[in-house]
Amino acid sequence: MCICLSDFLMGATVLHIETGNRALATNFFARQGMQQTIPNTATTTIQFDVEDFDTGGYFDNITYVYQPLVAGVYQFVLQLAATPPSTTAGRIRAGIAKGTPGSGVTKGISPYILLTNTQIPPVPPVVVNIEMNGTTDKVYAFVQSNAYSGTAMLVNNTPEATYFTGSRLR
């Protein structure tokens, strides 16, 4: 059985994900319940404070990190939409890092996208496979902003626009 992210976003209800060993079925879908202001020229952890599902209970919606206690290879997907400063343009990109927020190692990052007050293209999704040790490894999503005027950008908080999800592949 395949549960696709597009099915979830289109309103499908995920009742059950079956594997040979239920303890190994670990996946999550987190999103923002509020808009987040991103400072200029800063690397900022994205605050995914709402979990739509988290089968292993390993996503922390206070520290915004995913720390599974089952070792394996996980696939993570990050999608970001942002609103630029009201009167100027700015650049933004998103990434996924392994480690502690603020000092993690980047595993995947999108190119910078130019945002203007009349053109707001989506940031390309970041998709990365990461080996997790099942004890201390954790991952988080971040955003980097470079607003030309020195003002902040806002990350949009709609689930189809900005989300962070992950699944254990093997």
Image (cartoon, rainbow, N blue to C red):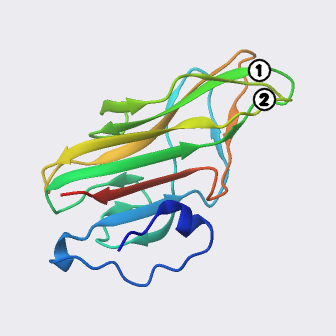
Disc 2 crowd, CA 10 A, few/some/many (<14, 14-19, 20+)? some
Residue 49 appearing in the image: no
Q: Which residue is mark 2?
A: 85
Q: Is residue 13 left or right of residue 114?
A: left
Q: Quadrant of residue 108?
A: top left
Q: Secondary structure at mark 1?
A: loop
Quick one: which residue is furthest to the bottom in this view? 15
Q: Secondary structure at mark 2?
A: loop
- Contact, mark 2 vs mark 1 (Cβ under 8 Å): yes
User: What's the residue type where badge 1 is placed?
Assistant: Ala
Quick one: which residue is furthest to the front in this view? 1
Q: Which residue is mark 1?
A: 89
Q: Is residue 163 left or right of residue 87?
A: left
Q: Is residue 19 left or right of residue 113?
A: left
Which mark lies nearer to you, 2 or 1? 1
Q: Position of residue 10 (x, y in %)?
A: 62, 68
Q: From this view, report whether residue 108 is shown above or below residue 167.
A: above
Disc 1 crowd, CA 10 A, few/some/many (<14, 14-19, 20+)? many
Residue found at x 16% / y 62%:
70
Residue 147 appearing in the image: yes
Q: From this view, report whether residue 35 is shown above or below residue 5.
A: above
The N terminus sits in image quarter: bottom left
Q: Quadrant of residue 84?
A: top right
Q: From this view, report whether residue 167 is shown above or below residue 102.
A: below
Q: Position of residue 119 (x, y in %)?
A: 80, 29
The C terminus sits in image quarter: bottom left
Residue found at x 52% / y 23%:
111
